[in-house]
Image (cartoon, helix red, strand yellow):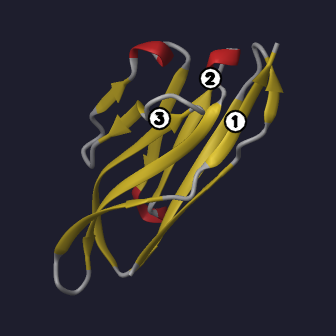
Amino acid sequence: QVQVVESGGDMVQTGGSLKLSCVASGTIQSINDMAWYRQAPGKQRELVASITSGGGLRYGDSVKGRFTISRDNAKNAVYLQMNSLKPEDTAVYYCSADVIIAPTWARYEYWGQGTQVTVSS
């Protein structure tokens, strides 16, 4: 099957930067949309950014102008460059991958385990 693993979470000061990475591996035929979500304790999960297979972009209102999503199809990877970080960005960040599975061509959304981002004031 497919495994999705995030990395890059850390503790930083307000105004700092981090780059998160997420790599999918396994019996992958292709990947459609990939996305980053985040969830803070006691809050609902929210969309941070998404990117289609063709490079179409969407960002959550709270991160527009500060975060940038990108992908490397050859590596089955998606990245999130996070700049001008604020304490409100503190959360567990998860990536998702809409995967076409080989050899059956079944479609399924996979999620990573999450990586913690903490922004101190």
Q: Measured from the top left, where is residue 27 in percent x and y?
A: 36, 81
Q: Marks 1 and 2, Cα distance to the nearest angstrom? A: 8 Å
Contact (Cβ within 8 Å) of mark 1 with mark 2: yes
Which residue has dot 2 on it?
Answer: 89
Q: Measured from the top left, where is residue 19 in percent x and y?
A: 66, 38
Residue toward you, 55 or 102: 102
Residue toward you, 59 or 11: 11
- Measured along the vertical axis of the image, is residue 119 above or below residue 84? below
Q: Residue at x 36, y 37 (%)?
A: 50
Q: Residue at x 55, y 30 (%)?
A: 42
Which circle marks residue 117 in the picture? 1
Horizontal placement of 107 versus 7: left or right? left
Residue pushed farthest front?
42
Asked which quadrant contains residue 91, the reply is top right
Give the mark nearest the N terminus, 3 or 2.
Answer: 3
Helix, strand or loop at label 2? It is helix
3 or 2: mark nearer the eye? 2
Q: Measured from the top left, where is residue 59 in percent x and y?
A: 38, 24
Which residue has dot 3 on it?
Answer: 69
Q: Quadrant of the N terminus?
A: bottom left
Asked which quadrant contains residue 55, the reply is top left
Q: How many marks?
A: 3
Horizontal placement of 95 versus 35: left or right? right
Asked which quadrant contains residue 103, the reply is bottom left
1 or 3: mark nearer the eye? 1
Horizontal placement of 45 versus 84: left or right? left
Residue pushed farthest bottom?
103
